[in-house]
Image (cartoon, rainbow, N blue to C red):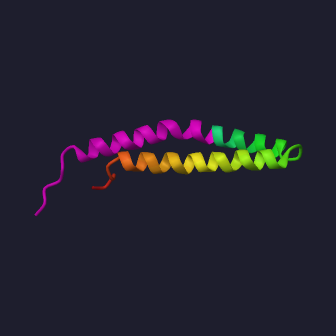
Amino acid sequence: MVEPNPNFDAELKHHYWAASFLLPFGSIFVLAIVVLLMVLFKRCPYVIAGVATSLLAMTVIFVIITSFNNTPLYS
């Protein structure tokens, strides 16, 4: 029988606390960017489409880079 890791619960709480702390700030930032892009889209649609594409690309690159540096949560 495999014995449970005594530090597992503490590590899990640390990860969830870090995520729950940043979640409201990220949500507000994303909502503000979406509203700003919607307002500006009527004036210059090609520039806004380029900005939106670059934001999505940077988000994907950031997620990929951070996933390489972290150990799996349930390992």
Residue 37 position by quadrant: top right
Horizontal relation, residue 68 to residue 59: left or right: left
Q: Quadrant of residue 66?
A: top left
Find residue 26 and report its horizontal and vertical position in percent: 58, 39
Which residue shows up at 50% across the image and 45% down it?
62
Q: Quadrant of the N terminus?
A: bottom left
Judge left or right: residue 55 versus residue 6.
right
Picture coordinates of residue 50 (x, y %)?
73, 48
**Outermost left residue:** 1
Q: Residue at x 42, y 38 (%)?
A: 18
Q: Nearer the viewer, residue 4 or 52?
A: 52
Q: Is residue 8 magenta?
A: yes
The residue at the point 17 percent across, 53 percent down is: 4
The residue sitting at the bottom extreme is 1
For the record, the magenta segment spans: 1-28
In screen coordinates, is 3 left or right of 25?
Answer: left
Give coordinates of residue 65: x percent, y percent: 44, 47
* Residue 32, horizontal then vertical, whole percent: 71, 39
The C terminus lies in quadrant: bottom left
Secondary structure mostly seen in the magenta stretch: helix
User: What residue do we see at 27% from left, 46% from top?
Assistant: 9
Figure disc tally: 0
Q: Tell me, yes or no, whether the highlighted magenta stretch contains residue 33.
A: no
